[in-house]
């Protein structure tokens, strides 16, 4: 039961962190877009990929631990 609680807290913190970055993403995209639209696109794709990558890595670490 304690492990489930830790997993839920970790997932909530990750989601909150990504939520904050997603909230700020339009400002980031506009700031970087002034420099290069290609780099702004890469940042957006990287953000989406990072979201799935974090949860994939977390699941992989938990599988090794169990």
Image (cartoon, helix red, strand yellow):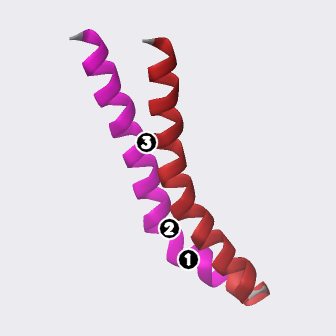
Q: Residues within 10 Å of mark 2 (few under 14, many from 20)?
A: few
The residues colored magenta run 2-31
- Give residue 37's position: percent from left, percent from top: 71, 88
Structural distance between the alpha carbons of marks 1 and 3: 21 Å
Q: Is residue 59 above or below residue 41?
A: above
Q: In this view, does 62 lie above or below 66?
A: below
Which comes before the other along the chain, label 1 or label 3?
3
Nearer the observer: mark 2 or 3; the answer is 3
Label 1 with label 2: CB-CB less than 8 Å: yes
Q: Which residue is drawn at 60% across and 79% down?
A: 29
Secondary structure found at label 1: helix
Quarter occupied by the N terminus = top left
Residue at far right of view? 35
Q: Residues within 10 Å of mark 1 (few under 14, many from 20)?
A: few
Image mark for residue 44 = none
- Give residue 49's position: percent from left, percent from top: 55, 59
Residue at far left of view? 1
Which comes before the other along the chain, label 2 or label 3?
3
Q: In this view, does 36 lie above or below 15?
A: below
Please give left or right for residue 7 compared with residue 49 in the image. Answer: left
Image mark for residue 24 = 2
- Give residue 58's position: percent from left, percent from top: 48, 32
Structural distance between the alpha carbons of marks 1 and 2: 6 Å
Please tell me which residue lies in front, 35 or 41: 41
Secondary structure found at label 2: helix
Residue carrying label 3: 14
Please give left or right for residue 34 compared with residue 8 in the image. Answer: right
Residue carrying label 1: 27
């Amino acid at each position: 039961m304690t492990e489930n609680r830790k997993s839920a807290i970790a997932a909530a913190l990750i989601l909150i962190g990504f939520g904050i970055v997603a909230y700020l993403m339009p400002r980031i995209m506009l700031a970087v877009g002034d420099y290069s639209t290609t780099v702004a696109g890469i940042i957006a794709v990287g953000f989406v990929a990072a979201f799935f990558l974090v949860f994939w890595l977390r699941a992989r670490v938990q599988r090794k631990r169990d």
